Image (cartoon, grey):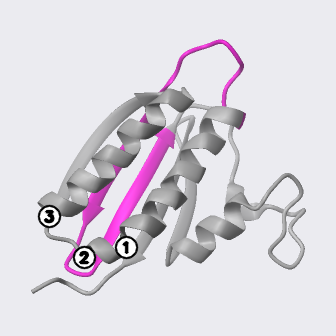
């Protein structure tokens, strides 16, 4: 399994770096580019939600993102030290619509698996996208 880890600040200006790293990881590991657009949109939504809701305003924090892949799937894990919150346990969602936005339903529609856990005062959120290996 190949891995790449980046650390970004909780700033919207870092979003371009996240997209660039996704593109590089997909290309350098010969992963089908067909999954790029779905994953780019999903991880941008996750990243923006973290910087918008996990931290107090006007303080800088690190968000670590790890890209890893197997023969048939790409996993992207976000780790932050923000306020504990499991986005998958949204109790205000009705018919895939959540008060406050379409973020989680959008992420679920663009990825094949999602997982959340709290580890030592950190939120760890992982999305997985399955693909067919390129020849």
Which residue occupies 27% across, 42% down?
A: 5
- Quadrant (top left/top right/bottom left/bottom right) for the C terminus: bottom left
Q: Which residue is mark 3?
A: 29
Residue extending farthest to the left is: 135
Q: Secondary structure at mark 3?
A: loop
**Magenta segment: does it hold 67?**
yes
- Quadrant (top left/top right/bottom left/bottom right) for the N terminus: bottom left
Residue extending farthest to the top is: 58
Task: Compare residues 43 and 75 and report the one nearer the observer.
Answer: 43
* Label 2: how many Cα within 10 Å (few below 14, some 14–19, many 20+): some
Which residue occupies 32% across, 53% down?
A: 22
Which residue occupies 36% across, 37% down?
A: 17
Q: Secondary structure at mark 2?
A: loop
Q: Which residue is mark 2?
A: 32
In this picture, is 6 found above or below 30?
A: above
**Image coordinates for residue 56, horizontal then vertical, percent:** 71, 20
Which of labels 2 and 3 is toward the front? 2
Magenta-drawn segment: 53-79
In this picture, is 84 found above or below 23?
A: above
Image position of 67 (left or right of 15): left
Image position of 66 (left or right of 98): left
Do callouts 2 and 1 mark residues in contact (Cβ within 8 Å)?
Answer: yes
Instruction: Answer with mark 1 or mark 3, whichever residue precedes in sequence.
Output: 3
In this picture, is 59 found above or below 98?
A: above
User: Distance from label 1 to label 3 (Cα)?
Assistant: 13 Å
**Image coordinates for residue 133, horizontal then vertical, percent:** 19, 84
Task: Compare residues 124 and 94 and report the one nearer the observer.
Answer: 94
* Label 1: how many Cα within 10 Å (few below 14, some 14–19, many 20+): some
User: Distance from label 2 to label 1 (Cα)?
Assistant: 6 Å
Which residue occupies 43% across, 70% down?
A: 128
Q: Which residue is mark 1?
A: 35
């Amino acid at each position: 399994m190949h891995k790449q880890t980046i650390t970004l600040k909780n700033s919207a200006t870092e979003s371009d770096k996240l997209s660039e790293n996704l593109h590089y990881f997909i290309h350098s590991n010969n992963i089908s580019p067909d999954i790029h657009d779905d994953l780019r949109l999903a991880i941008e939504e996750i990243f923006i939600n973290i910087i918008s809701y996990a931290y107090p305003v006007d303080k800088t924090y690190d968000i670590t993102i790890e890209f890893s892949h197997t023969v048939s799937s790409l996993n992207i894990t976000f780790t932050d030290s923000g306020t504990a919150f499991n986005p998958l346990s949204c109790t205000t969602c009705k018919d895939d619509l959540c008060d406050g936005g379409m973020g989680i339903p959008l992420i679920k529609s663009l990825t094949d698996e999602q997982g959340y856990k709290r580890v030592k005062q950190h939120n760890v959120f992982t999305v997985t996208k399955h693909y067919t290996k390129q020849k």
